[in-house]
Amino acid sequence: MFLTREQLMRVMERHVEATASAGATELVEVEAVDVAGGARGEAKTGASRRIAVLWNVTQTSIVERLEPDDLPCERIYCPLGVLEPREEGLVIVALAPGVSAVELQSRVSPTLKITPLVQEMVLD
């Protein structure tokens, strides 16, 4: 099941609230991300942390490399799950209910990693 906009926004808001002590966070709607966590989008604030919101997951929305001056993001939320850029690449850390890592991987070109502790996204 893909998450609706409303469901995905609630999941992101919970993450921001839970990590508020780490500094101001900005949610940035983006067109594309790369495996290093770079995003094609526009920051509107000077927040110390950025979380990317990728509404459409396609072969061209998650790529190996974007331009070097793209916006760095610490997490990427999409209707299928949550990705985190790490040294080993882009890692799936949570999946939407009913979505498998195989299904998410089938929609993108770069190979995604999966953490052994992958969780299902919790919905209200």
Image (tube, rainbow, N blue to C red):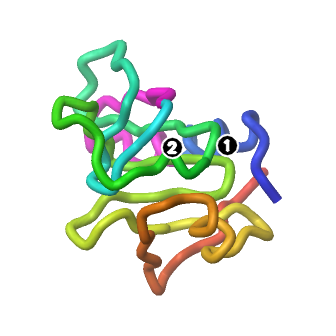
Q: Position of residue 43 (x, y in %)?
A: 34, 19
Task: Please report the bounds of the magenta region as a residue range.
Answer: 15-30
In the rendered structure, the answer to whether residue 75 lies left or right of residue 102 reads left
Q: Give me the C-alpha separation between circle 1 and circle 2.
A: 18 Å
Q: Position of residue 37 (x, y in %)?
A: 31, 48
Mark 1 vs mark 2: in front: 2
Q: Earlier in the sequence, mark 1 or mark 2?
A: 1
Residue 75's tag is none
**Furthest residue toward left:** 68
Q: Position of residue 76 (x, y in %)?
A: 46, 47
Q: Is residue 94 above or below residue 21?
A: below
Label 1: state its secondary structure: helix
Label 1 packing within 10 angstroms: few (<14), some (14-19), many (20+): many
Report which residue position mark 2 lands on: 61
Q: Residue at x 18, y 30 (%)?
A: 69
When asked about the image quadrant of residue 8, the answer is top right
Report which residue position mark 1 lands on: 8
Residue 55 falls inside the magenta stretch: no
Residue type at mark 1: give it: Leu
